[in-house]
Amino acid sequence: MYPTLYHAFLDLTGIDLPGLKFLNSFGFFVALAFVFASWTLGLELRRREQAGMLKAATRKVIVGAPATASELVIQGILGFALGFKLLYMVLNLTEATADPQSFLLSGTGSFVGGLLGAAAMAGYAWWEKQRTRLKEPRTETLQMLPSEHAGNITLTAALWGLIGAKLFHWLENPSEFLAFLKHPGGDGLFSGLTMYGGLIVAGAMVIRYFAKHGIPVWQGADSAAPGVMLAYGVGRIGCQVSGDGDWGIVNTTFLGPGPRWLWQYDYPNNVNSVGMPLTDGRPCFDGYCTVLPETVFPTPLYETVVCVGFFFVLWALRKHLTPAGTIFFLFLFLNGLERFFIEKIRVNVHVMGNITQAEIIASLLMLGGIGGMLWLRNKKNSDNGPETAH
């Protein structure tokens, strides 16, 4: 396992780049997942525009106005935060990379670097506005195609997805939330993310974005659904590579076919440092040198294979299933189906007897998917009116 990109580069190439310790492998694959989601969303929105299913929306903007005080303050705060950490990190690289997560969440930094960063970002924001400033600012009406929103939609999903993933994890594990409140400088903010929490919160905020910017909700949801399924599968690669605890139950029997690690894996150097000391000669990374005492099902791999497969199913059907919203509800059903059955061999927190939070959500997604498709079908039939007998 590779807890960070530093460990991957060091093991695979022998190159020692301490700065890569700030880039954990799970986060890298999550970022890659959002890139794929944005790309497929843009492709599908443009296809629907060309087919006449989506049209440009108008919005009013003020052109030529100077920078406002709030804009400069916001940029200054962001610049201070970046400069505060970056300059200190450059001057004290060994200290900062010894425990990157604790350093980022601590109050350690360079005040001078913060001031320089604040001045640089606020100054640049002021200069950008001055460069296009007009003697008399004017209001213009612009047209914006739905595909031009793809980047902002992805950023909205990324921000709220991470917030939702963390909140749902804390709901499942309240003791970890209390521990984080007591020690915010630890790794509590970076470890433990519930994928379904991210999916639900991000989905709600993206739908809100569609409605706010004049994008038909069902058309937008159908455009996003295949990419979200792909992103879910890619994100699970990060779980497997980092060994973040999303593995399966103990399995000591080789089930075949394929290599043994496809059915039995012990996650050496897992990012959570869970298990017993790693002493069998495999690479041992400082701070992560543990291995599970018994082999388990590598469930993130299974989820990746199934979800990527479901992506191709949704992508192939997107031009054929009507009315709008059907692809979205099919996505809900397939995602719930996959997660419900993977929970049977996956380690997780039980909230109601032997039932996990994910099983409850997966069941609701399947029911919602089936119910939604039936509702759309009935609505389509009622909109068309009764058939005329011949």
Image (cartoon, rainbow, N blue to C red):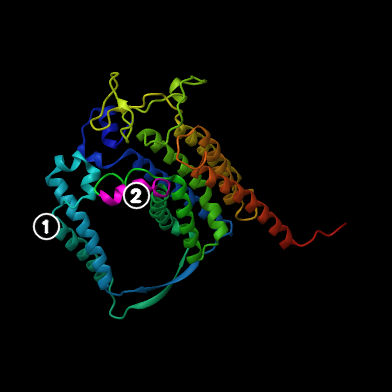
Three-letter amino acid code at disc 2? Phe
Which label sits on residue 9? none
Q: Is residue 93 above or below residue 385?
A: above
Going 45% across and 38% down the picture, which residue do you hit? 348
Horizontal and vertical percent position of residue 20 = 25, 39
Going 30% across and 28% down the picture, which residue do you hit? 290
- Extreme-front residue of the structure: 353
SS category of the residue bearing label 2: helix
Question: Start and end of the magenta stretch?
Answer: 170-184
Horizontal and vertical percent position of residue 121 = 22, 61
Q: What is the quadrant of residue 11 in the picture? A: top left
Characterize the local packing of mark 1: few (<14), some (14-19) or many (20 or more) Cα atoms within 10 angstroms: some
Q: Is residue 385 magenta?
A: no
- Extreme-bottom residue of the structure: 136
Q: Is residue 29 above or below residue 2?
A: below
Give the labeled residue for mark 2: 177
Horizontal and vertical percent position of residue 250 = 45, 26
The N terminus lies in which quarter of the figure? top left
Q: Nearer the viewer, residue 315 or 179?
A: 179
With 329 as the anchor, is 189 left or right in this view?
left
Characterize the local packing of mark 2: few (<14), some (14-19) or many (20 or more) Cα atoms within 10 angstroms: some
Q: Nearer the viewer, residue 368 or 159?
A: 368
Horizontal and vertical percent position of residue 220 = 53, 57
Q: Is residue 176 magenta?
A: yes
The C terminus lies in which quarter of the figure? bottom right
Give the labeled residue for mark 1: 112
Q: CA distance from mark 2 to mark 1?
A: 33 Å
Three-letter amino acid code at disc 1? Val
Asked whether residue 290 appears in the rendered view, the answer is yes
With 384 as the anchor, is 337 left or right in this view?
left
